[in-house]
Structure formats: structure tokens, C-alpha cells
Amino acid sequence: MQQINGSDYTVYFDTDCYAYLQQLLVAGSYSRIFILSDENTSVHCLPRLLGSLATEIPIELLEIEPGEENKNIDTCIQLWEALTELGADRKSLMINVGGGVLTDMGGFVALTFKRGMDFINVPTTLLAMVDASVGGKTGIDLGSLKNQVGIISNPKAVLIDTAFLETLPVEQMRSGLAEMLKHGLIADRGYWNEFTSMESLTTDDLAALIHRSVEIKNEVVLEDPTEKGLRKILNFGHTLGHAIESYFLESDDKEMLLHGEAIAIGMVLEAHISAAMGMLPVTEYREIKEVINSLYPVVDFTPNDIEVIMSLLVHDKKNEAGEVKFTLLEKTGKAVINKIVENSLIINAFEDYQN
Ligand SMILES: NC(=O)c1ccc[n+]([C@@H]2O[C@H](COP(=O)([O-])OP(=O)(O)OC[C@H]3O[C@@H](n4cnc5c(N)ncnc54)[C@H](O)[C@@H]3O)[C@@H](O)[C@H]2O)c1
Ligand SMILES: [Zn+2]
């Protein structure tokens, strides 16, 4: 599959990616290679990567505990200390093998260690393949504030080998799928249609869809790397989605929702708002709701849930000057940014979502 060029790095696909990795290792004349994985990717993904790596450069393995709760400064300190003890220098390379938690944090640790060493992302979840490992955002959480500390800077390369998805739990697959549906909704009607008309999905189909998603995200990021404007289209579904995700995370009596599951709900709600504001045709809203609600469990929201979720919107990192701004749909395949939405439209959207 054709490689995709970012501003100063390349995304490689299929098993070809290991041949490019070999070339990068030679070209970079690295002193040492540090491979970062978590307890799950060490078992499921690391052997495949190591088996594809033939090099004389010394390799050191670093492992962290999995999970968003470890995406914090304490884990970074452990990693900076391990790098120091193992003699890492600015000519060392870090290879991040894992999901978005690991690629976000591994990138941040590499970029800040001795003012920056090279890193390569090997995403192993669907979400990391189509979203987290592309676009240069790295960082960690600060307490309950997600991605509060970080840097936008690119890896040397991203290697996407879809064989890693074979061991990924189904709910994690569904979580990543939400970002792919989003790519269609905001930028490519034809791509969205591929999901609506799909009977079953072969491995080759999936690889082609992942490639198209990376292409869409990359096109957006190339035009607006630091999110001054256009890049905000990638936030469709995320204003309400993030608030729902945080609410479910912090409520003891609610089941946790994965990021993509919360975003899927956010997309239905924000599509409803788009229609209510006279942008998205109602027939297109109904199609979006039907497709998404057939793929994701429909969650119940009480009036109190809705109230708390709406109060959380105010804390959204994407807000400017205290104003909540939404990315909405003008039509399937075209998003508009910076829309202010009345509270009553949000309440109506929740009501329609549940009916
Ligand atoms: N940088 C960005 O632009 C960006 C974009 C979207 C999301 N993110 C970040 O990504 C993170 C979420 O990423 P995620 O959904 O990949 O979660 P994750 O990294 O927590 O991975 C999910 C789980 O799957 C396991 N796993 C990973 N690969 C596996 C495999 N091949 N087989 C079996 N198990 C495997 C992991 O160990 C983990 O337990 C969040 O922290 C979010 O902020 C960043
Ligand atoms: Zn997302």
C-alpha cells in the first residue's frame, strides 16, 4: 500500500514497513534502540516487531503498565530514569509499540529526553493507527485533565502493520472504528458510504479503510498542524463526546465508556444539533443515527446526567475565551467549525438520541 507523507515524516503500511524501518536505522546511525511497550503489547506485538528487526545496534526493552491511568508524569519519570541508567543519548532511537496511551507518552518522553531524541511509532490498536500516531500530538494527563501537558512534534516514521489487530479485543476495535466513521462524516461522503453499505469486512478491506483514514487525517493536519482552524474539524463528536467520557469515568454507578464509544454518541448528538440548526439535512441525520446506533450500545441518560454533562462542557480544553464551540456538519462529508450552540438544542439532541 502506498506510503503517506506527513510534513517531515512518512507513514508506511503492511509488512513493507519493516524494510523501511531497516533503512531508517541505517540512515540514522543510531547509538542504541529503546523499544517501549506495555504489558499487553510486550506479549502480543513485541515478538513480531523483534522478529522483523535485523540490526547490530544494541536494543533495550522498556515496559510500562497499560492504561490511561498510567499516562502521567510518574511514568515519564520512570522512563527518563531508565533511559539515563541505560545510557541513552541524543543519538538513540525510541520505538513506541502500543496504543494511543503509549504512543502519546512515548513520543513525549523521547521529545523531552536530553532535549529530544528520535522516535518511531508502531501503533497496535485501531485507534492509534487511524488517529493517535498520526498528526504529531504527544503528551500526558495531569490528574483528571486529559492531555494537559504535551508537545506537537512528529515522529521519524509511523509503521502500520494491521496484523497487530488480530489480538485486539473487539470493544477496542469498535472504539477505533468511531474515528474512522468521523473521518467519513467530516471529509469524505464516499468513505462514509463504504461503512453504510458494508456487509462483512475482510482483512484487506480493513487495511484499505485504515489507509484512507490516515490519508484524511494527514491532509487536515498538513493544512493546519497546530489547530488554528481547519484541524478543529477532527473534533466533530468530541465536544459532547469528551464530556460524556469524563462523566462516565468519574461516576461510580456508571459503566466506563471507551473513548470511541463516547465519541460515537457525541457524533449522533452533534449531528442532531447540526440538523436542528438548519445545516445537515434531516434525512442525513437519520442515516447517521441509524448507522451509529446499530454499531454501538445506546446509553441511557437521565435528566441529571444531561445536566452534569452540560456543566462539564465549560471545562473543555478546546474552548476559547470561555465559549463552547462545536464542530458541526453542513452535510455528510463536510464539517464546519466554531459554532455556538444553545443549551436547548443540546437537550433536544439527547432526547432524540434515546428515542
Ligand atoms: N495524539 C493524538 O492525536 C491522539 C488522538 C486520539 C487519541 N489519543 C490518545 O490515545 C489514547 C487511547 O488510545 P487507545 O485507544 O489505543 O488505548 P490504549 O493505548 O490504552 O490501548 C488499549 C488497550 O489495548 C491494549 N493493546 C494495544 N495493542 C494491542 C494488541 N495489538 N493486542 C491486544 N491488546 C492490545 C493496550 O495494552 C491497552 O490495554 C488516549 O490517551 C488518547 O488521549 C491521542
Ligand atoms: Zn477521538
Image (cartoon, rainbow, N blue to C red):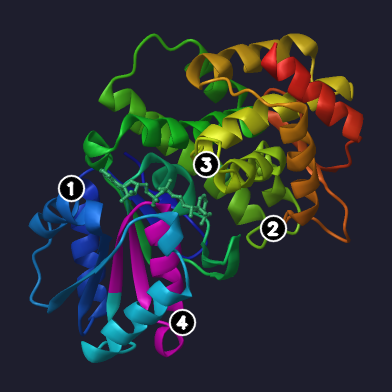
In the displayed structure, 18 sits above or below 169; it is: below
Residue nearest the observer in this picture, 71 or 118: 71
Give the residue number, with chain letter if any, for mark 4: 112
Q: Which residue is mark 3?
A: 259
User: Is the CB atom of the residue marked by disc 1 within 8 angstroms of ligand 1's nearest atom?
Assistant: yes
Q: Position of residue 347 (x, y in %)?
A: 83, 27
Task: Identify the mark nearer the N-term, 2 or 3.
Answer: 2
Residue 168 located left or right of residue 301: left
Task: Say whether residue 221 is left or right of residue 178.
Answer: right
Rendered residue at 57%/20% (across/down): 298
Q: Give the quarter the ligand 2 occupies.
A: top right
From the viewer's perspective, is 271 left or right of 156? right
The Cα–Cα distance between marks 4 and 1, rounded to whole angstroms, is: 28 Å
Which quadrant holds the C terminus? top right
As drawn, the label of residue 219 is: none
Q: Is residue 236 above or below residue 78?
A: above
Circle 2 residue: 227
